[in-house]
Image: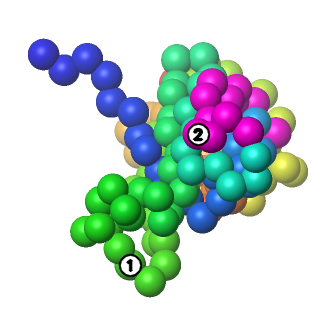
Amino acid sequence: MYETITVNMMVKNVKETIIFYEEKLEFQKILTVPEEGENLNFAILNKDKITIMIQEQKNLLSEYPTLKKDEIIPTFTLFITVDDIITIYEKLKDKVEIAKELHKTFYGKNEFAIFDNNRNILTISSEN
């Protein structure tokens, strides 16, 4: 039986990505490998019920060589549900690059999307 799924994102710089997620989205760093230093290979971040893993490009490619490309090009979006989209939008709109402005979708949700520091798209969605 499946229990959870957690994304592991390939990034150029783990430390810079941690800073983005901590400062802009208020995630907490749970673990890094190594524990300290400038050249981090891996990290786990958490906020509320969301956990993400980030892994440095060369380190991840040594594990999965079939992922090798000349550059990291995002091929997915992250879909995050929240309970108060207006507050979150107001908090983020001047801190991050907006990929898609706040709007009502054809399926009745309120959503907006942002780019993280690696150009991954994070869609933020709410019922109200």
Q: Is mark 1 on a helix, strand or loop?
A: loop
| Residue on which the image places disc 2 | 33
User: What crowding class fits label 2: few (fewer than 14 Cα within 10 Å), some (14-19), or many (20 or more)?
Assistant: some
- The residue at the point 51 percent across, 35 percent down is 52
| Residue on which the image places disc 1 | 69
> In the rendered image, which quarter is residue 6 located in?
top left
> In the rendered image, which quarter is residue 91 located in?
top right
Nearer to me, 82 or 64: 64
Nearer to me, 22 or 119: 22
The answer to whether 78 appears left or right of 18 in the picture is: left
What residue span does the magenta drawing correspond to? 23-36
Q: Can residue 95 be seen in this view?
A: yes
Q: Callout 1, which amino acid?
A: Lys
- The residue at the point 52 percent across, 17 percent down is 49
Q: Is residue 74 magenta?
A: no
- Dot placed on the residue nearer the N-terminal end, 1 or 2: 2
Residue 62 percent across, percent down from the top left: 37, 62
Mark 1–mark 2 distance (CA, rounded to whole Å): 24 Å
User: What crowding class fits label 1: few (fewer than 14 Cα within 10 Å), some (14-19), or many (20 or more)?
Assistant: few
Q: Is mark 2 on a helix, strand or loop?
A: strand
Q: Residue 50: which numbered mark, if any? A: none
The answer to whether 45 appears left or right of 74 in the picture is: right
Nearer to me, 86 or 114: 114
- The residue at the point 46 percent across, 72 percent down is 73
